[in-house]
Amino acid sequence: MTEEGKILNRQGEDIPEKHGVTARPLVLKSRGPLSVAIMREILCGNGLDGAVLLDATEVFRTRKDENWFATRRYAYFRDKLRAAERPFRVAPISHFNMGGVVADENGRTGVEGLFAAGEVVGGVHGANRHGGNALTDITVFGARAGAEAAGYAKSCERVNIDGLAESEIERYGSITREGSDPLGIMAALKKLMWLKVGPVRTEGSLRKALEGVKELKEKAKNVAARNAREMLVALEVPMALDAAGLIIRAAMERRESRGAHFREDYPDEDDSWLKTVILRKGKADEIDVSMRPL
């Protein structure tokens, strides 16, 4: 649908054509540049309610019902969105993180006894990846990490785990019915990260995002939970804020554009940045930054 339809801004301009996004198929080969182009249009006021338009009316009018790969999805677009009659709104989403846990080729991490594989690990695909590559990633490195972890487990002695969860139980018990709204904090964090750290980034937007995260961390020191859903989000908020801080700092350090990372103030690739940014949580919530050559 994306290939045969037209992606338009509110003025009716063809966004891929306007921004020189030509590699096809768009969803596989131009995912990053297309997301940047769409976000540029939204940020400069050429969007519509935080999105742009996908005009697939001609596709729906001319293609027979049985020629769609997913019939339920086709019915949704036809009946719910009325895609044969009018354009509908689309926007980029965050579906994959190029960074992640530092691990070797067999899944060993810097934490003794912890092994990682798949999309939680950073660096396997560099700064971008084509659709579907995650499957080979988890198949190959999942097998390696599993075998390595099994060998490690066999070599270890049994340990007493009584009391290891005490700190987490205390955190659970510290959440009361009075305090900040965890759902509101999470919603504010999502909006902040989307607008300031999304497909289009600048030094200024990243600094504002970092300040915003600090403010939300203050609010999150006393979150409340009045039901199960709020309790779940209350437990997730500190981790989400930590992850957001790491993402922002990594984006601030990399003063170039590469793959899915685009800096409006540094729009070109720079060979001096052929290296990996390593982040570690230091004392007093500080983040230690180092570089590792490829």
Image (cartoon, helix red, strand yellow):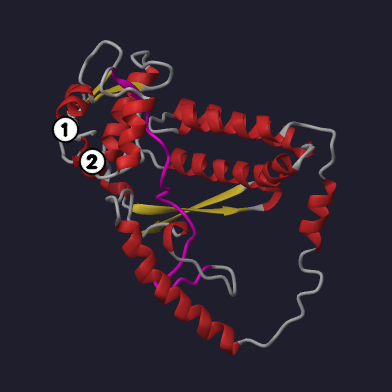
- Which element is circle 1 on? loop
How far apart are labels 1 and 2 at the CA level? 8 Å
Amino acid type shown at disc 1 = Arg
Q: Residue at x 41, y 31 (%)?
A: 201
Q: Point out the image quarter for the C terminus.
A: bottom left
Magenta span: predominant SS is: loop
Name the residue nearer the viewer: 70 or 120. 70
CB-based contact (under 8 Å), mark 1 and mark 2? yes
Which numbered disc, 1 or 2, marks the residue that appears first in the sequence? 1
Q: In the picture, residue 49 is in which quadrant?
A: top left
The tally of labels here is 2
Quick check: 78 left or right of 188?
left
Observer able to see residue 141: yes
The range drawn in magenta is 86-109
- Crowding at dot 1, Cα within 10 Å, few <14 / some 14-19 / many 20+, comes out as few
Q: Residue at x 33, y 14 (%)?
A: 46
In the rendered image, residue 24, in percent from the top left (x then y), is placed at: 16, 40
Asked if residue 224 is positioned above or below residue 114 in the image, the reply reads above
Name the residue nearer the viewer: 63 or 93. 63
Q: Which residue is mark 1?
A: 63
Outermost residue, top side: 11
Amino acid type shown at disc 2 = Trp
Asked if residue 13 is positioned above or below residue 7 in the image, the reply reads above
Q: Which residue is mark 2?
A: 68
- Which element is circle 2 on? loop
In the rendered image, residue 18, in percent from the top left (x then y), is placed at: 19, 21
- Residue 186 lies within the magenta run: no
Q: Point out the image quarter for the N terminus.
A: top left
Observer able to see residue 267: no
